[in-house]
Amino acid sequence: MTIFKKTYSKAGAMMVAGMVAGQAGTAHAGNNFSNIAANITTSISDLPGLLSALSYLFGILMGVLGVMKIKDHVENPTQTPLKDGAIRLAAGGALFALPIMFEAMFETVGTGTTVDAAQLKKVNFVTT
């Protein structure tokens, strides 16, 4: 047991030394708020695609589970209620449609489109 611990300790120490040596040659621009914000923006740029993929995946999974529950209801109606399968089918459909709904909302709102407030350009008071 102690041989494995020593081996893992040596391997870990070598990995840390390699990372430190690799970082020594790079020049850092400094950690200010602008660089941190730019890094965060770059890092989360692929997040909508990941969420869409997960939504499609879980939507299909819930749909399949819903069909299987409905099959269980058909085989044994007293043991499995129909609502279990219907709920899973509805949740799967909602998850499957979620990326399409987000895209529709985004296209409706748009980017860079602003609505200006109404401005009063001229006032006339007429008395008779």
Image: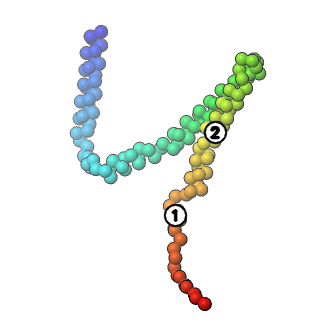
> Where does the N terminus fall, quadrant-wise?
top left
| Residue at 23% from the left image edge and 41% from the top image edge | 25
Badge number at residue 114: 1
Badge number at residue 94: 2
- The image quarter in which residue 62 lies: top right
61 left or right of 6 in image: right
> Where does the C terminus fall, quadrant-wise?
bottom right
Residue 81, can we see it? yes
101 left or right of 80 in image: left
Contact (CB < 8 A) between labels 2 and 1? no
| Residue at 67% from the left image edge and 35% from the top image edge | 90
Question: How much space separates mark 2 and mark 1, taking CA atoms?
Answer: 31 Å
Q: Which mark sits nearer the N-terminus, 2 or 1? A: 2
| Residue at 25% from the left image edge and 46% from the top image edge | 27
Query: What is the secondary structure assignment of the residue under circle 1?
Result: loop
| Residue neighbourhood size for the residue with mark 1, other residues' Cα within 10 Å, grouped as few (<14), some (14–19), many (≥20) | few
Q: Nearer the viewer, residue 121 or 127?
A: 127
**Percent of width and height locating residue 119:** 51, 74
Query: What is the secondary structure assignment of the residue under circle 2?
Result: helix
Task: Say which amino acid is labelled 1.
Answer: Thr
| Residue neighbourhood size for the residue with mark 2, other residues' Cα within 10 Å, grouped as few (<14), some (14–19), many (≥20) | some
Task: Say which amino acid is labelled 2.
Answer: Ala
Q: Decide: is 1 above or below 123.
A: above
| Residue at 55% from the left image edge and 36% from the top image edge | 54
**Percent of width and height locating residue 108:** 59, 56
- Of all residues, the one furthest to the bottom in this rendering is 128
- Of all residues, the one furthest to the top in this rendering is 1
Badge number at residue 80: none
Q: Decide: is 76 above or below 93.
A: above
